[in-house]
Amino acid sequence: MAYILLRPLLNDVPEDELCGVPLGKVLPVSPKWHPLLIDGPLLHSAAGSG
């Protein structure tokens, strides 16, 4: 949860960008901005396959 909330503040996200989400909207997990959550070891180890 913390990663999703802090992701727009990381260096690879432009200052005027909120990971493709308009201000005041929900921050979804998307492959473009959250590949570590979708394909990374966090998801696989939580599912027991890593």
Image (spheres, rainbow, N blue to C red):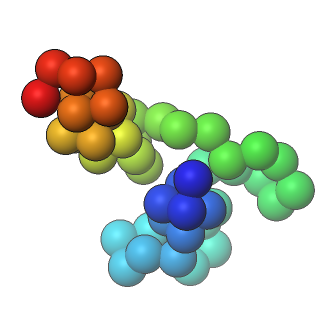
x then y, percent, for residue 16:
63, 73
Question: Is 48 rendered above or below residue 33?
Answer: above
Q: How many numbered dots are placed on residues in this image?
A: 0
Quadrant where the C terminus lies?
top left
Quadrant in which residue 24 is drawn: bottom right
Q: Is residue 28 left or right of residue 47?
A: right
x then y, percent, for residue 40:
22, 39
The answer to whether any part of residue 22 appears in the image is yes
Question: Is 3 rendered above or below residue 15?
Answer: above
Q: Which of the two residues, 22 or 26, is positioned nearer the viewer here?
A: 26
Q: Which of the two residues, 39 or 23, is positioned nearer the viewer here?
A: 39
The answer to whether any part of residue 8 appears in the image is no
Residue at 28%, 42% in the rendered image? 42
Q: Which of the two residues, 5 or 14, is positioned nearer the viewer here?
A: 5
Q: Is residue 26 left or right of residue 49?
A: right
Return the residue found at the far right.
24
Residue at 22%, 22% in the rendered image? 48
Question: Is 10 rendered above or below residue 31?
Answer: below
x then y, percent, for residue 10:
43, 75
Question: Is 23 rendered above or below residue 42?
Answer: below
x then y, percent, for residue 37:
36, 41
Q: Is residue 15 left or right of residue 10?
A: right
Quadrant in which residue 15 is drawn: bottom right
Q: Which of the two residues, 29 or 43, is positioned nearer the viewer here?
A: 43
Return the residue found at the far front.
48
Residue at 78%, 52% in the rendered image? 22
